Image: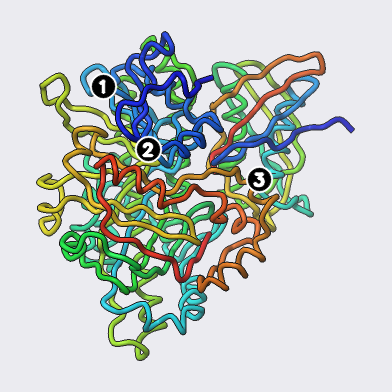
Amino acid sequence: MVDKKDMKRVEEYVYEIPKSFRPDMRVPARLYADAELLEAALGDRSLEQLINTATLPGVVKYTLAMPDIHQGYGPPIGGVIPSRTSDGIISPGAVGYDINCGVRLLRSNILAEEVKPIMGDIVNALFRGVPSGVGRSGDIRLSHRDMDDVLEKGSAWAVSQGYGTKDDLEHTEERGGMGGANSRKVSGKAKKRGSSQLGTLGSGNHFVEVAEVEKVYDQKVAEAFGLFEGQLAVWIHSGSRGLGHQVCTDYVRGLQQAVTKYGIELPDRELVCAPFGSPEGQDYFAAMSCAANYGFANRQCLTHLVRRTFEQVLAGKVSDWELTMVYGLTHNIAKVEEYPIDGKSTKLVIHRKGATRAFGPGMKVLPADYREVGQPVLIPGDMGTASYVLVGTAEAMEKTFGTSCHGAGRVMSRRAAKKKIRGQELQQELAEKGIVVRGGSMAGLAEEAPAAYKDVDRVVNVVHSTGVARKVARLVPLGVIKG
Amino acid sequence: MRERFEEIEHTADLAIRVYGRDMKELFANAAYGMFALMAEPSKETTCEREVSLEATDYESLLVDWLNELIYLHEVEGETYYAVAIETLLPTELKAQVTGGPTRSKTKAIKAATFHDLAIEETANGLVATIVFDV
């Protein structure tokens, strides 16, 4: 068991577990946290999981965990694993089952104040208009050919069907489509699981949230992102649904033999992996890219449903109900990116598991209107507190492989939350705070209660203070639908 | 009655500890434990499905078994409450599951994982901990 005394503070809010801590570690492991978040991390097995990631072949510099770290399976949630493409690995277990679970933020041109009196109507309409909940199907049925297009083109497929605009694509990570996706590497079972779930929110921590920009910290960057105080905005959080789950299941199973074949020793079988350049590694990468594209397309379809709902509810009531993409990004993914290692530009497979890309200014892959300031880093908090928009920095490129945290991070188990909190009472409490919440089930709502999460202000303060991402705006929830 | 499974703490996901006098009972109880998390029991018996799997060891087989049932539950819209395991070798499983249409889903389980998975022999029989991604 790792203890506080095993960790060295390398700078304020950055702790390092040295390579010498365990003989199988190839590099040190770093945690971004303040004293209280460190205590929380020591409260479950997340640091042991972080140490496990430092044993993987080809890892460079250090593996990382962000301040929203908590226990997952395989790597901790909030984990970042950089592995060389030349002699390193790609791991389906390290990406996780909800491949390209991610978030997007839409901005309106109106003040939240204008719609607060009808927030109940908006939330009810969203609950009707956006399929959500356990195993719920959507209205979109995909033929085999459509499915292959979704898997290989991602959001561009959804836009070609009228579910969005070119501007949406411009403002999505990877323009909403990973290259190298090959639908032949995705099993029939995965395609079957995904055939009726496009345009559905799912359950768990997935949500649509109507929010108000409460405070702007950085006027110049906020202007570049089109954000202003008092503005109405919408968050969408969902993933690649059953299709992504099955792709991960298939490759976690299939790659168990690759581990033996390539002589890889693992501290946890869920960290199953294959050399990135091997046929097994490349097959997974192509299939994962397909699942990521399904995730992008899913959020694009959800965006369409939210816009349609806004039009239905707000037309005639407010002057403008248009919603424009601020940005869309992914939380669970492996991507090839280049970073200087030992003074040499090196291609790395960056696994982000519950972590957000946070590219700084000047990166060519960013949309033209953000290139000068950096990438929007979207950090949804819990449904009763706040969410943040930050901006990526040059420091992130140096220190964290261009990565920031992805949310508040859980601190209480779902089981404990259900025991401690009653969904109905929570709904009432939030209503008293002016937040309208609707969920598929009261138990599901209780599991996602604000008390089950860390303090998002504290988590964001760590990434802001370390310079990994800088605060741009804080948003507060007004209406939430949970799956 | 002897406990078949229990839910245990996990920060982000769900985990169960499963018991069995022998391997067949452990596998059956793992399925019962998982479905207890996922859905209300089905009241009617309208479907029977054959499950046939091959794997490299009992642990892989256990994960495959549960993931196959998750797949059938999601794609066929069925919940199973009776399990008959005909063959169970370290590399092979043949079973029949019986159930009915899912009436009320309580939790979407994305997958059963290998995390922390070990089938252990104790004085009282076999024990396994299974972590599910939810």
What is the x, y in percent for residue A94? 40, 31
Dot 3 or dot 2: first in sequence order is 2
Left or right of A455 on screen, residue A395: left
Whether residue A303 is visible here, answered yes or no, is yes
Q: What kind of residue is marked 1?
A: Lys
Q: What kind of residue is marked 2?
A: Met
Measured in 3D between alpha carbons, the distance from the residue under mark 1 to the one under mark 3, in whole angstroms, is 37 Å
Question: Where does label 2 land, which residue?
Answer: A66
Asked if the residue at tag 2 contacts the one at tag 3, i.e. Cβ–Cβ closer than 8 Å, the answer is no
The residue sitting at 73% across, 46% down in the picture is B99
Quarter location, residue A312: bottom left
What is the x, y in percent for residue A436? 52, 72
Q: Is residue A253 above or below residue A234?
A: above
The residue sitting at 62% across, 56% down in the picture is A446
What is the x, y in percent for residue A112? 36, 77
Q: Is residue B101 above or below residue A358?
A: below
